[in-house]
Structure formats: structure tokens, C-alpha cells
């Protein structure tokens, strides 16, 4: 109950920050003993006031999985893992402490919210120094005083000149101040089974397969062909949701009222047809049923996602999986999109400003490290010249994608990203919409009933909204 209250209080405080002036100091709200809110002014420690010699000896990093930890272990110069404690490492004489809380049931954000509320009064070694955010909820954090401008760390526009603009837009606050950086770019593609493509279409060549999924009408026709051959075109309707939702022409909330874009409703219409015809399922992402298609016996033709999905989340390391055998390939699919990514934010109050600056520069601006990450981790990184050069390099290929070099496809996709319709309500609205529509797809509610469930769930989450 305490965690839920703290999370709610922080969310309200952060949303209020969207409308606060740049020069105003954010108010910190903490619950009193009787449960009533008490407003306290948050004290700040400007980065420029912290000399390197005065910096702390503990660097606390908050994240939801070990992806960033592995990137630091493998690529950050001078990082040493603690052989006896997986939650710790060292950089010089600084102890690095990894606080990893899974995303499930919003646990990561709840933990982060509660700890940030205590940041001003925490002792130096307990303060959050770095925390990571995802695109869906980045604005919740970057539009507050809990995150430091990267310029205050000494990271300049010149340092970030080669990064993709959309990765900056996501972590730029409402006053135009950049509050985070990322080593990743996450343009999406459609990953499909080469064996299924050869069996059903006679070719696994990406250009040939693209003809069968070039737009949503063609995609839906191809779903019929695949069903007749014994395959689901995608594992779940939720696989395609991001593609539709990234191509909306309006925001989830307009003038305080919940708004469902036409392209979101097209996802509902198309998905209902696919489900009713048995051409896909309604599995939750990351569930066991959704994951069955990572293996040949799962009988799934394709998944939509960015590089991190096929490399990090589709069992590529597991013997017998399609990825482990190099059995996936990538093509553009019906529409361009992006999904996710991880941004590094510096927490206000950190006593490790100089070290955080170096981590940001090394991990997101050092072109040689960027190339290492691509080669070693099969990722797509946030460095335009490096990616364009490697896209043209015939010596680079992805083992998981059967020797294909997908970087040119990703480079083209990232240039077309339009983030003008992002809002602070995206995570809650996207999650509740998919949850409500599952009832409709499964036949447990009619469309009006599912929409009513959605509206009520969103208003409960964001009481300031109407519908």
C-alpha cells in the first residue's frame, strides 16, 4: 500500500511538473504518518558545484534488467565485476551498486519513485546516481527536477551531434532541456522464419517476403495463406500493436479528454478478424504462450520488434530455437515503427557527476565502443555515421538473421520516426487499451463494453482526464 501511494504521489508531482516553469523549483511530496500529503521543497546539488575530488565512492544505478549492466561490463573501460557479488562492481576506487527491479507489475517504477522521493534526505552513499527509463514513461521523469540536464554534467551538443534526433526528443523536457542519453536506436522490423517463408512462399529473400506484407491489407491476406499452411502469421495481436500505435496522427489525450486515434481502432478491427479466423492469438507479450514461436514447433511466422527483441528476448542463446540456428530474417513490414530503448538519466543530488559524464560519453558517443556493441551484441546503436558505415560494410552480418545485414533497413526506418504524438499518458493508455481489447478479442465482451472498461481504467489511473 505504501509503495502504491508513493508512486501515485510521485506521478502527480511529475505530471504537475509538465506545467511548471523552467526556473521554478519542483516541490517534493511525501506522505505524512496519517496518509495526508505533505509538500516539502526538494534541495538540489548542481553538478557544476561538485568537484571530481569531492565525488562519492559509491555509484548507485537503478534499472529493470541486466542489459545495461552487461553493456558496462563488456564495453566500459576500467569496469571490473565483483566475483563474489553480482550486484556490485568497481570503476577505479568507486564501488558500483546495481539495483535491479523487474518491470513486472510496475515494480521498477514503484521502487524508483519511492527512492527518488527520499533522494534529498538520503546519505551520499545511498543516493541514486543513475537511473534508466524507457520511452513509454520517459516524460514522467525527465519533465521534473529529479533528473539533471546532461549539460549540467558537461555533456555538450557537440558530443551528441552524431546521435539520432528521436533519441534526444524522447528525453527532452517541455522546456527543451535534454535530460538523458541512450546507446541504442530502436527502429523496428518484421522478423520472420526463413524456413516458413521458403515452405509457403518459395523464398526467404527479404525483398520477396516484403511483397507479402507490404501493407495491412496484403498482410491480412497473407495471414489466410499461412493459416492454410498451418502457421500463425504472428504469435499475438499484441505483436502488431506497436506498429499501429506508432503511426497515429493524434495523441492519447487531447484537451484533457481521452482520444482513441483512428489507427488504433484499425488495429482493433484487423486484429479481431485475425483472431476470429484463428490466424493469431491474444497472448500477453513475454508470456509462455507468446514465446512458443521462438521455436519451430511453435508454428509462428513472424514477430515485430527492434534489434533488441530478436537478439535479447527471443531465446537466441537457447539450443533448438530459431534464432540459435540463424533462422530469422528481417524485412520492413507494413509500416515503420520503433519500440522501446533504454535511456541513461543522472539523478539530481548525485555526488558522482564526473563519472556519470564519462559513462554517458563512453557508452553513447564513443564510436569505437558503439561499433563493438553492434558486432558483439548484435544491437543497433545511437550513432548515425557508425551505423551508415556498417550498413554498407559487407563484412558485417547477423548470425541470428542467417547472415543478413539489417542495418541499412534500420537506418532507413529511424529517419522516418515521428514522435510528435508522444505524451505522458502513453504507458497507461497503451497498457489498458490492450488489456481491455483482449476481452473483446476473446469474446468476453462486445466492443462497446471493452471500450467502456478501457475508459474507466484510464480515468482511475489518471483522475484528471475525462472521456
Image (cartoon, rainbow, N blue to C red):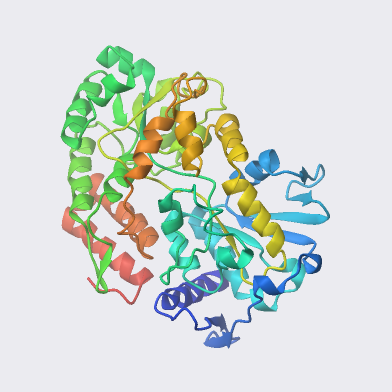
Q: Quadrant of residue 70?
A: top right
Look at the image and tell me whether residue 380 can be seen: no
**Residue closest to the eye, 50 or 185:** 50
Is residue 329 toward the left or the right of residue 93 in the image?
Answer: left
Task: Determine the residue positioned at 55% across, 58% down.
Answer: 108
Q: Quadrant of the C terminus?
A: bottom left
**Residue closest to the eye, 90 or 154:** 154
Q: Position of residue 137 (x, y in %)?
A: 44, 60
**Residue closest to the eye, 146 or 467:** 146
81 is higher (above) or lower (below) than 319 = below
Q: Position of residue 248 (x, y in %)?
A: 24, 53
Q: Position of residue 34 (x, y in %)?
A: 57, 87
Q: Quadrant of the N terminus?
A: bottom right
Task: Determine the residue positioned at 48% across, 24% down.
Answer: 393
Task: Determine the residue positioned at 21% across, 36% down.
Answer: 274
Q: Position of residue 126 (x, y in %)?
A: 73, 67
330 is higher (above) or lower (below) than 38 = above
Looking at the image, how many numbered discs can be counted on the residues?
0
Is residue 403 toward the left or the right of residue 189 in the image?
Answer: right
Is residue 330 toward the left or the right of residue 56 in the image?
Answer: left
29 is higher (above) or lower (below) than 150 = below
Farthest residue toward the front? 158
Look at the image and tell me whether residue 166 can be seen: yes
Q: Quadrant of residue 172?
A: bottom left
Is residue 251 toward the left or the right of residue 47 in the image?
Answer: left
Amino acid at each position: 500500500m505504501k509503495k502504491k501511494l508513493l508512486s501515485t504521489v510521485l506521478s502527480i508531482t511529475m505530471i504537475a511538473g509538465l506545467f511548471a516553469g523552467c526556473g521554478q523549483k519542483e516541490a517534493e511530496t511525501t506522505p505524512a504518518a496519517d496518509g495526508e500529503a505533505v509538500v516539502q521543497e526538494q534541495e538540489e546539488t548542481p553538478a557544476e558545484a561538485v568537484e571530481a575530488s569531492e565525488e562519492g565512492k559509491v555509484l548507485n544505478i537503478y534499472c529493470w534488467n541486466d542489459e545495461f549492466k552487461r553493456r558496462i561490463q563488456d564495453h566500459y573501460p576500467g569496469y571490473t565485476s565483483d566475483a563474489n557479488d553480482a550486484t556490485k562492481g568497481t570503476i577505479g576506487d568507486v564501488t558500483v551498486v546495481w539495483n535491479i527491479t523487474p518491470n513486472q507489475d510496475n515494480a521498477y517504477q514503484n521502487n524508483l519513485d519511492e527512492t527518488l522521493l527520499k533522494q534529498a534526505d538520503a546519505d551520499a552513499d545511498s543516493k541514486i546516481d543513475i537511473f534508466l527509463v524507457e520511452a513509454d514513461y520517459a516524460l514522467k521523469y525527465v519533465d521534473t527536477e529529479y533528473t539533471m540536464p546532461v549539460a549540467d554534467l558537461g555533456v555538450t551538443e557537440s558530443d551528441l551531434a552524431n546521435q539520432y534526433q528521436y533519441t534526444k526528443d524522447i528525453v527532452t523536457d517541455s522546456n527543451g532541456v535534454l535530460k538523458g542519453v541512450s546507446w541504442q536506436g530502436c527502429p523496428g522490423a518484421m522478423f520472420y522464419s526463413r524456413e516458413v517463408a521458403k515452405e509457403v512462399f518459395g523464398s526467404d529473400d527479404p525483398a520477396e517476403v516484403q511483397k507479402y506484407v507490404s501493407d495491412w491489407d496484403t498482410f491480412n491476406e497473407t495471414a489466410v495463406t499461412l493459416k492454410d499452411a498451418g502457421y500463425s502469421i504472428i504469435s499475438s495481436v499484441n505483436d502488431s500493436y506497436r506498429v499501429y500505435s506508432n503511426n497515429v496522427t493524434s495523441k492519447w489525450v487531447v484537451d484533457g479528454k481521452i482520444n482513441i486515434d483512428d489507427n488504433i481502432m484499425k488495429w482493433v478491427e484487423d486484429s479481431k478478424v485475425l483472431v476470429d479466423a484463428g490466424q493469431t492469438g491474444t497472448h500477453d507479450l513475454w508470456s509462455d504462450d507468446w514465446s512458443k514461436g521462438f521455436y519451430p514447433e511453435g508454428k509462428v511466422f513472424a514477430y515485430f520488434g527492434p534489434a533488441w527483441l530478436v537478439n535479447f528476448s527471443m531465446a537466441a542463446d537457447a539450443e533448438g530455437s530459431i534464432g540459435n540456428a540463424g533462422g530469422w530474417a528481417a524485412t520492413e513490414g507494413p509500416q515503420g515503427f520503433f519500440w522501446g530503448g533504454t535511456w541513461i538519466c543522472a539523478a539530481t543530488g548525485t555526488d558522482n557527476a564526473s563519472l556519470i559524464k564519462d559513462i554517458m560519453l563512453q557508452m553513447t558517443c564513443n564510436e569505437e565502443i558503439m561499433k563493438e556493441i553492434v558486432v558483439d551484441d548484435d544491437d543497433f546503436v545511437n550513432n548515425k555515421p557508425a551505423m551508415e558505415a556498417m550498413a554498407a560494410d559487407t563484412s558485417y552480418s547477423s548470425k541470428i538473421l542467417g547472415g543478413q545485414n539489417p542495418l541499412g533497413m534500420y537506418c532507413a526506418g529511424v529517419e522516418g520516426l515521428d514522435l510528435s504524438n508522444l505524451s505522458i499518458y502513453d504507458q497507461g493508455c497503451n497498457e489498458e487499451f490492450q488489456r481491455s481489447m483482449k476481452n473483446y478479442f476473446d469474446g468476453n465482451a462486445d466492443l462497446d463494453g471493452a471500450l467502456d472498461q478501457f475508459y474507466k481504467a484510464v480515468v482511475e489511473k489518471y483522475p484528471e482526464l475525462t472521456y
